[in-house]
Every structure is written in C-alpha cells, then in structure tokens.
Image: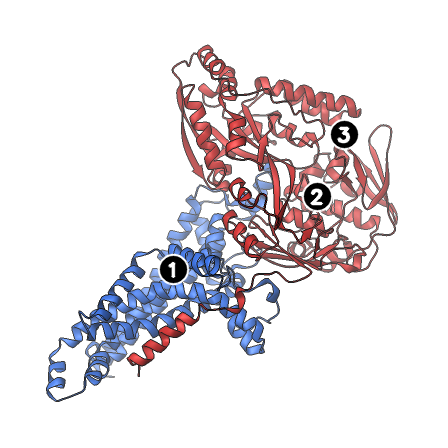
Chain colours: A blue, B red
C-alpha cells in the first residue's frame, strides 16, 4: 500500500474518530444541563399533588436518588445498548418517538433544502455574473433580509399573510383533521405516504400544509446559500483561467456555468451540507410556530415538560445528524478536490 | 443545466405554491367536533394514574363512575353505575348496588367485580391519585378484604377508619373512581402491572366515548363507543393541541376548529356579541393565591399577612385583567364546592394596610421576591400585585418561571412570596382544607407536604379542625366546621386567596350541547351536536 493511501486513511480515521468524542461531549453537556435545571423531573411525571411516598418511589425508580456520575454511567450503559430510555410525555421508548417524529422533520428540511438549492444557487451565480446590476442588488437585498429576520418571525409573517389575511394557505399542523389517520404510515412522511397509497386528496392537503413551513425554512437557507454562491463565483470569475477562457472566445454562459461554477462546486457542497444541518436547528422554531409534529417540536415540548430522556435523545439525534453531515461534506470535499488528496 | 429560464420557472413555481392551496379550506368535517386546547399536560389515561386536566377530562367521557355529584346541585350525590347505595349507621360500611343495564365498550356488562378490581388496582398500583382512596386507611394488605364484590351487582366497601360519608362519596366520584373493565385490563397486563402500561394510552370504560388516538402535545381523538349503549351526539371528538390562546382564536374564526378552550379575556372581547359564536362558562375549582413563606422573618408576622391581604386591589385585577375568566374568591374553598363561603372580606384599603405594616414594625417596608408562572394572565396580575404592594412599602422583585419550575421551587420551600394556582383534587371541602390548613409535621420528613407545609404554615387548631371535619358523620355539623375554618383562615393564614377560575369555551354557533364541569372530569361531550 502506498504512503499516500496510508496518509489518506489516517486522515479519514482521524476525522471519523472525532465523531464519538464530539457526541460524548454533547451527551455530557446535555445530561448535566438536564440535571441542573431548576425543574424536578419527578414533578413532570407524578404532578404537583403527589404525596411524598409516591415522589420518593418514582425518584428511586428513575435512579435520580443516586450520585450524578452513577446516573450518567447508567445512561451511557443504556445508550450503548440502544436504549435511550422512556419518554415521560409520550410514555413510549424515546427511540420509538424519534422514529415517529423525525420523518416529519426530514420531510420538511429536505423540501426546504431542495427549494433553497433550486433558487439559491442560480440566483447566486447570476448575481455574481452580473455584479452591480439591478439583479445583483435585488439578490443581495433579498438574501440580506433572509439572513436578518429570525426564522420564527418570518413564520409568523407568512402565517399572517397567507393564512389569516389572504386565506390561501392552510393553518398550522401537518394535515387537516379530516384526513388524519387515513394513510398507513410507511415512511411517516405524509406527502410520500399519501402518494404511495394514491390518496391524492390527502396528498394535496399534506402538500398544502407543507408549503408554508418549507418556504420559511427554504428562505432561511436560501439566503445563506445564495450569498456564499455569489461570493465563491466572484472569486472564481476573477481567476486567470476565466481570462484565458474569454481569450479563447468561450461564450458568457459557458464561462459562468462550465468554468467558474464547475470550480466552486466543491466548496458549495460543504455550504449546502452545513445549511442542511442548520435546517434541523432552524426547524425547532419553525416547527413550534407551525405546530409541525417533528423532532423540533418534540424537543421543545419535552424541554418544557422536563422530560429529560426525550431531550437527551432528540439532542443526540440532531447532534449526530450535524456531525454526520459535516463528516460527509468533509469526505466529499476530499473526493471532489484533488488538491486535498 | 440551470439557466436563467429555469431560474425564472422555479421562482414562478414557488409563487404559485401559495395560490389556492387545497388545504386552505376552513371547515371541520361533519359529525366531528374539533377543539383547540392546550393538551401537553397529559401524562396517562389510566384512571389509577391520570391526574391532570386534559387526561381527567378525557377519562370523564370514556368511563363511568359509581356515583357523581348531581349536575344541577353539586351539593348532592347522584347515581351513575350504582343506582343506589346504603351507608351503615356507624358510617363504616358502604354498599353499592350497580345497575344491570350498563355495558363496557366490549359489550360486556359492568359488574361489581369490575368495580372491586378498579379500587384494588388503585391501591395496589399506588400512583399519584391513589391517596384519594388510601387516605381512608386502605393498604395493599387490607384492600382485598375490605372492598369486595358480594354479588354480581353488589359492592361492599368497609372503611378501615371512621370517615364522613359525604367525604367518602365525593372521593369515589373523583376521576380515580372511573370503573375499568377487569377483563380488558388483565388481558393487556405486562409484568403484573394490572394493565397500567396499556391503559396509559387506551381506555376500557363504559362511557360514551373511547380513546382512539393520542399523540403527545399534538392531538387526542376519541370516537363514539356504541358497545356501551351510551349515546354520543357526534361520532368523533378531536382535541388539537394549540398552546397559544391567540392562535386558538384565529383557528376558531377561520373555522379550523369548532371550539376554543383557552381563550383569555382579550380574545373573548374580540368575539363578544358576534352571532357567529357563542360561549359556555363554568366556575371551576381552581384558585389563584399568594403564598407567604413563614421562613422569611418579615413574612412570618401576622400583621404582614393582613397588610398584604388589604393592599391588593382584587376587584381591579378581576375587572381589568381577567374579566370573564377569573373572578374574586377569597375563601380557600372555591365557589361550588360544598360549604364554600362566598363573602369577600378583603378589599384594597391602603391606610389599614400601612397601619398593619407599622404595627409589625415595618413602617419603612421591606424587599422580597415573588415567583409566578410566566404566562398570561399571571404576568399581568403579578405586575398589578407588585404595584399594589409597593404602595405599602413592600418592594417585590418578580421572578417569572415555567410552571414546573415554580412548583419545584415552592415544593423545596425556597420561595418568599409565590403566586400559584391550586386545583381541588376531588369535589369535597376536605381537599382544599387539608391543602391550605393542615400541617401536622413541619419537618422535612413530613408525610403531608401540601401547601401549608410548603410555606411553613403551622396552625394546630386548623390542623385539628381538618381532621375533625373529615370524620364528622353529621353533614350539617361538618359544613359548619368548614365555615369556621374559612373564617379563621382569613385571620391567621399566610395565604392571600385572590381569584377563582371561570372556564370559558368559545364555540361556533353550529355547535351545541357542550357542558363544562366544575372539575375537569365533569366536563361532558356526549350531548354535543353539530349542525
């Protein structure tokens, strides 16, 4: 095996090795925050009126009467066996809850990132190709606005405009109550499941409910992707190889899309991966505003109910996705860019 | 390849996505009533465990009990599954005769064996609401001997200790007294849990509805339960979790829901007089009060208790902040509970309050903190109280917190002032009398850590009176004891009782028959109709 292959494997192992360390840190910090929160998790289970003997029994059942390091050790032991504990709020195992709620988040975030890529990338490219033009100014204003407005404010503005004032979009939630439970949850993404079953009424209703939160999240990511694309393109268009291409008589479109855009594809992958990961973070607020039954809403409600197993589990999943997407972006960067090999 | 043309096309498609979306239609389905309600309090639907507002309300419509308070006169007990009952002269034995007509959703008849099983499992599982039954002296060891089905439709309950009959009967009418189908629970039990795990998310009752689906903090769906023979005016009721009252109003106005359950005064003003909506309201056994922790020397002075009670402008708060939703009630018993006094002895009298501060040696005032639940209308009420108390020299620093955070702090007795809400556990005066007055042991090892204990309020006379009233066999004498307690409480207790909740449900005009109850499990959905 050649030395360069060894070096690449070593780099890959180093990158992958940082994942468990990052996740361990995440679990530790979240666990500690959960334990020092000024809310007694036992109250969340038994309520305010429970007698002292019931409270003491439940505290012991949860292991909360043991020293903190012991509690953490038990949690880690269970975690290594794939057991994230049971949610107080839903009464289900947290793993089951995550399997239930995550697909809705995935559906929302994926729709949003696709919209953001479809609009953001061409907008950034064209703005850079026509630097200083009206189009460029427009793109900059739109993207600056998108990056400046908090996502929950944007969500409320969208609801006010399209649902309350214009009445052309459905309100909050994932589906109209009339269609609730009509589709067998296969992927648990309602739009997909409805299409798979050929239930087109449900499909259109689910799609309509998806539109506003997806647009809000898409705008949030679009701003970032557009600005980064524009910046990469400006840098690429100033390259000497572009001057050479022009001298060789290549057309404007060919120079922009083939030569310049082709060269920014590598860093753009990282940007998109980070934007996609960021959507999971943004989804917490968006899901709360739109009552979207995804992992973000699950996390928020669990936190307010001091349901620490659920909070830890959901945080771990979000963190894991963030780390994995970062890792994939890193790997893609190395695969696509020969200079990093 | 992406070109300017594809960019324009995709932008146009985005714009089109907002046009005439099919889900934009605003109407709930026929035969289905959709309620917007905050339902994230649900912990379990098992009557032996359920103890929060929403799960109790759901249970109340999916199960039946032996007896219930009379809907027309809650001071009387009315039959439900038990068509009649007898109490022995010494008050120690209760015999219930169950109707032969009642059936569970499975179609099986409700028998005394089901009732026996219900109370046995409450005591044996010993979950939060079990104390409502175990406070009579039942234990895991004696319950099977003392509560038994002596015939297919006869249940005999022998009390381990003497109790007031009305006290016992009202406790049996609490949610914990919902009769569970024994066969269904045992068929689904795991590891000897008597069906607890299954009943957390299912119902097995003889009520007009059955639980079909529950997703935490999202929805509860109940469907008519035809096997019971109980009639339901609609085929399905959906409780949709909507936390924000303003959003509830919006959904009601747009037709996204039929009933909004948590509107505040400001939202109710918006629809007042609008013929498209109507309102149902009912005083509920929930009270807002200020607790003064006796571990703080200034707050331990009796004159300061009185000064605070005389400094608050109760009427202004009720009129300006909580019209229609909270009204003034200054007794520790809420209106509607047997024996509750409805007089309002305290009104704002700043001169008197300042004099009392002087008598306490605190004419220059003092500073303290006040914890409260950071949600409307409590934030506005807390500010009003802060302003009122500043007029007699008490500088209050407001400490807003999540409900469970504030409760955690008060349970740990770490508060100074705390403004909180208390709901009665069952429809009997003992519930609140014990909570506010009884503190037989103020140590950390006390077996009774309710409100008096949490604020270090120790009053031997009131504590004894609570015990006496709970065992008084004569109903009239019993109510007289509660009257005396309430009057003494006004003079000595470090609690400023302020307001009582008035539950309000706003609904579209095509929905009728919705009945709010004084307790969550007495709210009835069965008579709802939707035209």
Looking at the figure, which quarter contains the N terminus of chain B? bottom left
Chain of the residue that carries numbered disc 2 in the rendered image = B
Q: Which residue is mark 2?
A: B522
Q: Earlier in the sequence, mark 3 or mark 2?
A: 3
Where is residue B462? Give x, y as percent.
64, 21
- Judged from this view, the residue extending furthest toward the top is B359
Q: Which residue is mark 3?
A: B163
Q: Residue furthest right?
A: B151
- Give the crowd class for mark 1: few <14, some 14-19, many >=20 residues within 10 Å: some
Q: Residue at x 26, y 79 (%)?
A: A336
Q: Which mark is residue B312?
A: none
Residue A281 is marked as 1
Does any portion of residue B455 appear in the rendered image? Answer: no
Local packing at callout 2 (Cα closer than 10 Å; few below 14, some 14-19, many 20+) is: many
Q: Are marks 3 and 2 on the same chain?
A: yes
Considering only vertical position in the picture, is B411 above or below A32?
Answer: above
Indicate left or right for A103 with B77 as reference.
left
Of circles 3 and 1, the one toward us is: 1
Residue B447 screen position, x and y as percent: 61, 32
- Say which residue appears at 75% left-offset and 26% top-offset: B471
Q: How far is the residue under mark 3 from the one under mark 2?
A: 24 Å
């Amino acid at each position: 095996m050649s030395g360069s292959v060894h070096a690449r494997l070593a780099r890959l192992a180093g990158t992958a090795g940082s994942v468990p360390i990052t996740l361990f840190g995440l679990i530790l910090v979240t666990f500690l925050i959960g334990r020092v929160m000024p809310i007694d998790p036992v109250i969340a289970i038994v309520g305010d009126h429970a007698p002292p003997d019931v409270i003491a029994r439940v505290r012991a059942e949860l292991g909360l009467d043991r020293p903190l390091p012991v509690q953490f050790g038990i949690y880690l032991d269970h975690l290594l066996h794939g057991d994230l504990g049971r949610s107080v709020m839903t009464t289900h195992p947290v793993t089951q809850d995550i399997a239930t709620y995550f697909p809705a988040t995935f559906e929302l975030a994926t729709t949003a990132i696709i919209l953001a890529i479809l609009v953001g990338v061409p907008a950034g490219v064209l703005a850079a190709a026509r630097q200083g033009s009206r189009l460029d100014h427009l793109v900059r204003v739109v993207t600056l606005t998108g990056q400046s407005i908090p996502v929950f404010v944007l969500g409320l503005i969208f609801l006010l405009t399209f649902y309350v004032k214009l009445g052309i979009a459905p309100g909050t939630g994932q589906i109209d109550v009339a269609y609730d439970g009509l589709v067998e949850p296969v992927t648990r993404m309602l739009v997909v499941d409805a299409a798979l079953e050929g239930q087109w009424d449900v499909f259109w209703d689910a799609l309509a409910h998806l539109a506003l939160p997806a647009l809000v999240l898409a705008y949030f990511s679009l701003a970032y992707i557009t600005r980064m694309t524009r910046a990469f393109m400006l840098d690429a268009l100033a390259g000497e190889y572009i001057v050479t291409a022009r001298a060789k008589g290549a057309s404007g479109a060919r120079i922009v899309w083939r030569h310049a855009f082709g060269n920014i594809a590598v860093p753009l992958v990282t940007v998109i991966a980070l934007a996609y990961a960021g959507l999971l973070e943004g989804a917490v607020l968006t899901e709360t505003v739109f009552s979207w039954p995804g992992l973000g809403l699950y996390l928020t409600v669990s936190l307010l109910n001091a349901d620490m197993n659920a909070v830890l589990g959901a945080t771990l999943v979000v963190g894991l996705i963030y780390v994995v997407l970062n890792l994939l972006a890193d790997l893609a960067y190395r695969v696509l860019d020969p200079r990093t090999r | 390849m992406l070109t300017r043309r594809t960019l324009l096309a995709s932008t146009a498609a985005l714009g089109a996505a907002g046009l005439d979306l099919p889900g934009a239609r605003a109407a709930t389905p026929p035969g289905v009533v959709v309620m917007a309600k905050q339902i994230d309090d649900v912990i379990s639907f098992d009557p032996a465990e359920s103890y929060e507002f929403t799960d109790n309300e759901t249970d109340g419509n999916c199960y039946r009990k032996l007896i219930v308070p009379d809907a027309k006169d809650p001071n009387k007990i009315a039959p439900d599954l038990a068509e009649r009952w007898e109490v022995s002269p010494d008050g120690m034995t209760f015999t219930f005769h169950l109707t032969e007509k009642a059936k569970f959703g499975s179609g099986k008849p409700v028998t005394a064996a089901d009732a026996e099983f219900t109370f046995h499992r409450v005591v044996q599982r010993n979950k939060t609401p079990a104390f409502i039954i175990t406070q009579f002296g039942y234990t895991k060891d004696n319950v099977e001997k003392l509560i038994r089905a002596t015939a297919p439709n006869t249940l005999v309950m022998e009390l381990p200790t003497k109790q007031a009959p009305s006290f016992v009967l009202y406790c049996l009418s609490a949610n914990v007294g919902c009769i569970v189908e024994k066969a269904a629970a045992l068929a689904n039990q795991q590891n000897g849990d008597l069906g607890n795990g299954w009943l957390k998310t299912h119902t097995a009752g003889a009520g007009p509805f059955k639980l079909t689906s529950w997703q935490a903090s999202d929805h509860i769906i109940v469907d008519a339960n035809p096997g019971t023979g109980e009639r339901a005016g609609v085929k399905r009721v959906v409780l949709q979790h909507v936390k924000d009252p303003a959003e509830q109003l919006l959904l009601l106005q747009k037709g996204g829901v039929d009933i909004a359950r948590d509107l505040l005064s400001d939202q109710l003003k918006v629809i007042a007089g609008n013929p498209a909506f109507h309102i149902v309201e009912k005083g509920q056994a929930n009270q807002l009060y200020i607790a003064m922790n006796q571990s703080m020397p200034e707050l331990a002075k009796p004159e300061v208790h009185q000064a605070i009670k005389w400094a608050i402008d109760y009427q202004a708060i009720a009129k300006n902040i909580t019209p229609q939703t909270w009204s003034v009630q200054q007794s520790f018993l809420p209106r509607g509970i047997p024996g509750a006094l409805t007089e309002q002895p305290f009104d704002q009298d700043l001169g008197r309050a300042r004099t009392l501060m002087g008598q306490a040696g605190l004419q220059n005032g003092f500073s303290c903190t006040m914890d409260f639940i950071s949600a409307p209308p409590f934030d506005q009420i807390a500010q009003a109280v802060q302003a009122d108390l500043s007029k007699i020299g008490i500088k209050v620093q407001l400490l807003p917190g999540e409900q469970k955070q504030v409760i955690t702090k008060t349970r740990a007795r770490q508060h100074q002032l705390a403004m909180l809400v208390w709901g009665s556990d069952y429809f009997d005066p003992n519930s609140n009398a014990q909570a506010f007055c009884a503190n037989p042991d103020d140590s950390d090892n006390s077996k009774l850590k309710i409100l008096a204990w949490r604020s270090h309020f120790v009053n031997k006379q009131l504590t004894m009176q609570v015990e006496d009233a709970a065992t008084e066999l004569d109903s009239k004498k019993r109510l007289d004891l509660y009257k005396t307690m309430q009057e003494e409480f006004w003079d000595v207790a470090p609690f400023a009782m302020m307001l009582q909740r008035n539950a309000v449900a706003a609904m579209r005009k095509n929905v009728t028959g919705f009945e709010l109850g004084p307790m969550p499990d007495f709210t009835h959905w069965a008579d709802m109709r939707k035209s």
